[in-house]
């Protein structure tokens, strides 16, 4: 009897953004720290939970991150922190060190 070789591929469209603890998903500084370590995120994880979607939208509207969906194939979005975003992230670390976790100012 001939044995068939079956191959399968599992695609993952996640960088881990949707696996952050729920409190971090609502904390702009925590999301900025995460995004500083990746070059892209998927549309699926950005829209996986309302808390992530709202935080991501805030970061875009506040010009704390730049997004690039043109040079990346769907479902990926290129992400980079702006100078203002890096400043916000650093100030967030200082706030957390002084008083514990703090979200939007």
Image (tube, grey):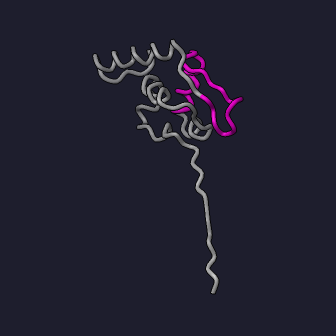
Query: Residue 34, how many percent across, how many down?
Result: 46, 30
Residue 31 horizontal side relative to residue 72, left or right: left
**Outermost residue toward the front in this view:** 2
**Outermost residue toward the left in this view:** 98
20 or 73: nearer the viewer: 73
Residue 78 horizontal side relative to residue 30, left or right: right
In the rendered structure, does residue 65 fall within the stretch colored magenta? yes
Query: Residue 44, how many percent across, how many down?
Result: 60, 41
Residue 51 horizontal side relative to residue 67, left or right: left
In the rendered structure, does residue 60 fall within the stretch colored magenta? yes
The part of the image, by quadrant, that contains residue 61 is top right
Query: Residue 68, how many percent across, how many down?
Result: 65, 26
Residue range (magenta): 52-78
Locate the C terminus and report the quarter of the image it occupies: top left
| Residue at point 55%, 30% (across, down) | 39
| Residue at point 54%, 16% (across, down) | 82
12 or 30: nearer the viewer: 12
Locate the N terminus and report the quarter of the image it occupies: bottom right
Residue 30 horizontal side relative to residue 14, left or right: left
34 or 37: nearer the viewer: 37
The part of the image, by quadrant, that contains residue 65 is top right
**Outermost residue toward the right in this view:** 70
The image shows residue 23, relative to residue 44, as above or below, that is above
| Residue at point 58%, 15% (across, down) | 63
Query: Residue 50, how many percent across, how many down?
Result: 55, 35
């Amino acid at each position: 009897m001939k044995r068939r070789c079956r191959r399968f591929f599992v695609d993952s469209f996640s960088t881990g953004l949707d696996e952050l603890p729920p409190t971090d998903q609502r904390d702009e500084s925590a999301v900025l720290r995460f995004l500083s370590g990746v070059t892209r995120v998927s549309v699926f994880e950005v829209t996986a939970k309302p808390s992530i979607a709202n935080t991501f939208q805030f970061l875009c509207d506040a010009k704390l991150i730049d997004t690039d969906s043109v040079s990346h194939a769907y479902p990926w979005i290129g992400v980079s922190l702006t100078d203002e975003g890096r400043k916000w992230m650093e100030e967030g670390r200082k706030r957390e060190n002084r008083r514990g976790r703090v979200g939007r100012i």
